[in-house]
Image (cartoon, rainbow, N blue to C red):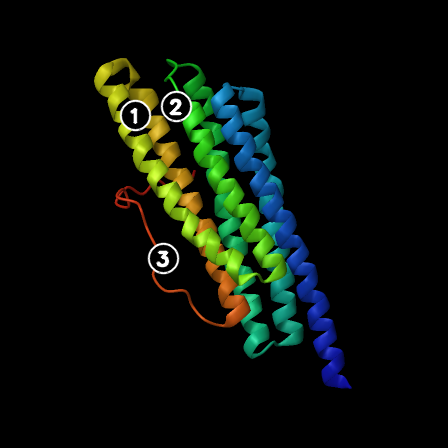
């Protein structure tokens, strides 16, 4: 009876953490969508809302961390239960970084709004961000249902984000070669495109955690379509 009681309490605690994770993921998904919208439309007010909204994401991560520490201290999970806790901690940290990347995109809106308009740049970034946002939504759905097939699909779709990044780099180089006045703005857009690609990598990592959580097995080398991996642009 005691073992049953402990297991039941652990499941309740883990369910509470799971709900916090999904709430955090929803906020991050919204931040990605709104920051890309603000970038395309040069909407500085919307961008500022995204920046300020990142505090809520940080608070959710802190709450998840506190709940995880309490669960570890009180329930002392073993084997599969411990695997679930470790996966959740990793995913929460990745979601926080995703929020930082969205915030970083929003913070560049004011700078880009003051410079020359780069034709098609904002809409192209928004399409790239939309792809990552849909991947994030599906990753969270896979997490909620422990859907291995959906998680695998998310992993495979990251290649599309890599291809988009490469195409954007070529586009921005063309703009810079055509007019040196475009260089500063195109460099900002290059940083943003690379950060969105990093978002895709983090979402893919979350999908790998879902598979680990569901099966106990680590995913092998993921498919990549990226030739820009040497450029590392961390969020502010």
Residue 61 in the image: state x and y as whole percent: 59, 51
The front one of 31 and 57 is: 31
Q: Which labelled disc corresponds to residue 187?
A: none
Quadrant including the C terminus = top left
Quadrant including the N terminus = bottom right
The Cα atoms of the two marked residues, 2 and 1, are separated by 8 Å
Numbered disc 1: secondary structure: helix
The residue that label 1 is drawn on is 172
Choose top left, top right, bottom left or bottom right for residue 49.
top right
Q: Earlier in the sequence, mark 2 or mark 1?
A: 2
Q: Do the residues labelled 2 and 3 touch (CB within 8 Å)?
A: no
Instruction: Answer whether residue 234 is visible to the viewer in this image.
Output: no
Residue 92 in the image: state x and y as whole percent: 55, 54
Find the residue positioned furthest to the left: 177
Numbered disc 3: secondary structure: loop
| Foreground disc of the pair 3, 1 | 3
Residue 166 in the image: state x and y as whole percent: 30, 36
Q: How many marks?
A: 3
The Cα atoms of the two marked residues, 2 and 3, are separated by 28 Å
Residue at horizontal 43 percent and vertical 45 percent from the top? 200
Bin the neighbour count of mark 2 within 10 Å (Cα to Cα): few under 14, some 14-19, many 20 and up.
many
Tell me if 53 is positioned left or right of 9 in this view: left
Residue at horizontal 57 percent and vertical 67 percent from the top? 85
The residue that label 3 is drawn on is 222
Residue at horizontal 57 percent and vertical 46 percent from the top? 137
Instruction: Answer whether residue 110 is visible to the viewer in this image.
Output: yes
**12 w.r.t. 185: above or below:** below
The residue that label 2 is drawn on is 121
């Amino acid at each position: 009876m005691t073992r049953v009681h402990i297991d039941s309490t652990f499941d309740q605690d883990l369910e509470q953490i799971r709900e916090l994770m999904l709430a955090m993921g929803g906020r991050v998904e919204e931040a990605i969508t709104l920051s890309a919208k603000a970038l395309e439309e040069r909407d500085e007010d919307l961008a500022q809302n995204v920046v300020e909204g990142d505090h809520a994401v940080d608070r959710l991560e802190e709450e998840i961390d506190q709940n995880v520490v309490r669960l570890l201290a009180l329930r002392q999970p073993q084997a599969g239960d411990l695997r679930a806790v470790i996966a959740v901690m990793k995913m929460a940290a990745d979601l926080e970084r995703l929020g930082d990347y969205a915030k970083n995109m929003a913070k560049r809106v004011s700078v880009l709004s003051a410079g020359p308009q780069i034709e098609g740049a904002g809409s192209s970034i928004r399409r790239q961000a939309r792809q990552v946002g849909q991947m994030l939504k599906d990753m969270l759905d896979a997490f909620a249902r422990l859907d291995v097939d959906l998680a695998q699909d998310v992993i495979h779709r990251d290649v599309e984000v890599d291809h988009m990044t490469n195409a954007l780099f070529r586009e921005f180089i063309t703009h810079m070669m055509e007019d040196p006045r475009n260089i500063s703005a195109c460099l900002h857009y290059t940083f943003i495109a690379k950060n969105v690609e990093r978002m895709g990598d983090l979402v893919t990592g979350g999908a790998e955690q879902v598979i680990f959580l569901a099966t106990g097995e680590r995913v092998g080398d993921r498919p990549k379509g990226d030739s820009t991996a040497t450029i590392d642009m961390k969020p502010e």
